[in-house]
Image: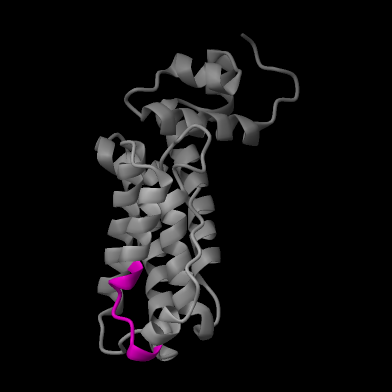
Amino acid sequence: MGRPPGFDKDKVIQAVERQFRRSGYAGTSVDDIAKAGGLGRGSLYAAFGDKSKLYLRTLGAYCDRNEAAWAAVLEGPDGTALERLHAYLVKSARVVHDDPDRLGCMVTGFVVEGVDHDPQASARVRQALMRIEGSLTGCVQAAQRHGDLDPEADATGISQLLMAINRGMEVLAKGGLDAVALQRVADQAFEGLPLTARARSQQASRPVVSDAS
């Protein structure tokens, strides 16, 4: 298979990214990559380099997009910070089920697979996790400023706990736990936050609405 005339590099990167997310770095061959991208081996190497370079490129693109998506969920005014933390948990519960191929996070896949082929990839994954943790910590601190979370609670510790719940729900979803069960996990995790008495009173007065289906 030769190079298609005027092929779209971004579409190739997206297709190859999904292949890596589907079968992991070790489980993805150059032939798999070529097939996913619709290119011949020669065209693939000429356009993107070897498998390691292409993995790093797709990982970087995925991390950029993922960081921006979580920042969009978590960043905003202090007055709605608590709602945004709940939205983070709800989205965490649905992220696998909302994907038609049930693919998980590429960052999680990298860590679980134990890929050690490129220190640049390891560094990019650490950077992604730190940036998401930063967005979470900022949101927790906003909720504390607004009086919705205990101001004495460890904001960094809470953000790391929420990240652990996020990754755990992803694994459970890929293991077969359905969206309704994961919504219950998200709700329970939210209830476990160090909410102030005022915030608990406000939450109790609101009707229960579930996004799960």
Q: How is the image coloured?
A: one colour
Quick one: quadrant of the N terminus?
Answer: top right
Which residue is at the front of the view, 170 or 210?
Answer: 210
The residue positioned farthest toward the top in the image shown: 1
The answer to whether 163 appears left or right of 53 in the picture is left
In the rendered image, the residue lying farthest to the right is 6
- Residue 18 coordinates in the image, percent (x, y): 49, 32
* Res 166 → quadrant: bottom left
Q: Can the viewer see residue 119 in this picture? A: no
Left or right of 107 on screen, residue 99: right
Residue 46 in the image: state x and y as whole percent. 57, 22
Q: Where is residue 104 in the image (x, y as percent from the top left)?
A: 41, 40
Quarter holding residue 43: top right
- Which residue is pictured at 69% across the width and 30% down the height? 8
| 145 in magenta | no
Identify the residue at horizontal 36%, vertical 30% (top origin).
24
- Position of residue 167 in the picture relative to residue 45 (left or right): left
Q: Where is residue 6 in the image (x, y as percent from the top left)?
A: 75, 25
90 up-or-down from 192: above or below? above
Where is 199 relative to 119, above or below?
Answer: below
Residue at coordinates 50% horizontally, 27% vertically from top-left? 49
Residue that appears at 34% across and 22% down: 27
Closer to the camera in the image, 137 or 195: 195
As displayed, is residue 187 above or below residue 108? below
**184 or 131, which lies in front?**
184
Q: How many marks?
A: 0
Q: Please report the bounds of the magenta region as a residue range.
A: 190-198
